[in-house]
Image (cartoon, grey):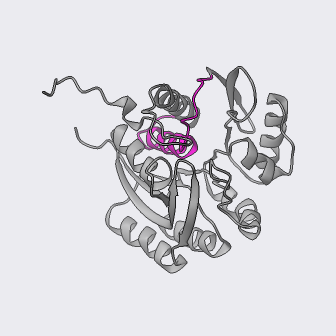
Amino acid sequence: MNPKSKILIIAGSDSSGGAGIQADIKTVTALGSYAMTAITAVTAQNTTGVKSIIEIDPKDIFNQIIYTCEDIRPEAIKIGMLHSTRVIRSVLKALEIIKIKKIILDPVMVAKGGAKLIDDKAIKLLKLKLIKKVLLVTPNIPELEILTKTKILNKEDMVYAANKLLELGAKNVLVKGGHLANKNVIDIFINKRDIKFFNNNRYKTKNTHGTGCTLSSAITTFLSCGKAIKKSCELGIMYVNSAIKSNPKYGKGHGPINHLTSLKIKTKFK
């Protein structure tokens, strides 16, 4: 099978393989595209939490982006963990040079175990500058609460807060509703012309590590192959739900999901 498109991932590394760059590469590859990377940080973590974060020099992040794109130009870009203002500025500078239009931002702020992954000054710069440069922002509810300083208790609050992001310059927003204590999971896609509610079953499992990274990478992959932005969100959600449902139950904490859910191996190996 030949890759259908090329994608650059700008994000941090997760040593346990469930989230971050590792989850992104697995997702892009499983969905049939070619993954390239610009690593922003190296974390020591497992399913129970984050032990340490080693920052990559912003100059090296800039060089990873530029040098990669000079040789293999991506159809789309996924952005994940950006932990400081220096990192965000280096990414913004690189984006101005490479001029890719299909960019998805997953505003990673807090790890599944509760560790903070971005400082307050970086959050402010992300709101003022980076949100305006991307095609889609994919916050979960805690991230959206931080970005909009709004308490979110229901789907009406999700819509209200998402509109605040549109006022800040976001073109499209996908709010991930998994943190609400509802029977079903409601995700909401919204822009200034359209709104779409995705209503799906909630699976009783603690193995949801890396769902946000995986979803944004899946959306980026579908978008890079020519799907419309709303359809890409729908297909990405379907992929993640399948990956959650078939998770491998690894680890003692919040385990990873099954990124191979899209692969059907017909040959029987003995």
Q: How many marks?
A: 0
Q: Is residue 133 magenta?
A: no
Q: Nearer the viewer, residue 204 or 180?
A: 204
Side of 37 where 154 appears, left or right:
right
Q: Is residue 226 magenta?
A: yes
Q: Nearer the viewer, residue 136 or 152?
A: 152
* Quarter-of-image position of residue 189: top right
Q: Nearer the viewer, residue 174 or 101?
A: 174
Residue 68, compared with residue 177, is above or below; it is below
What x and y, as percent, mark residue 211?
A: 55, 40
Side of 137 where 100 appears, left or right:
left
* Quarter-of-image position of residue 205: top right
What x and y, as percent, mark residue 172?
A: 67, 43
Side of 230 where 256 appears, left or right:
left
- The residue most toward the front is 252
Inspect this view and state whether residue 44 appears: yes
What x and y, as percent, mark residue 70?
A: 36, 69
Residue at 43% from the left image edge and 50% from the top image edge: 17
Residue 130, compared with residue 87, is above or below; it is above
Q: Quadrant of the N terminus?
A: top left
Inspect this view and state whether residue 11 appears: no
* Quarter-of-image position of residue 222: top left
Residue 215, compared with residue 184, is above or below; it is below
What x and y, as percent, mark residue 68?
A: 37, 67
Residue at 79% from the left image edge and 36% from the top image edge: 158
Residue at 72% from the left image edge and 49% from the top image edge: 143
Q: Quadrant of the C terminus?
A: top left
Side of 267 where 144 appears, left or right:
right
Magenta span? 202-228
- The residue most toward the left is 270
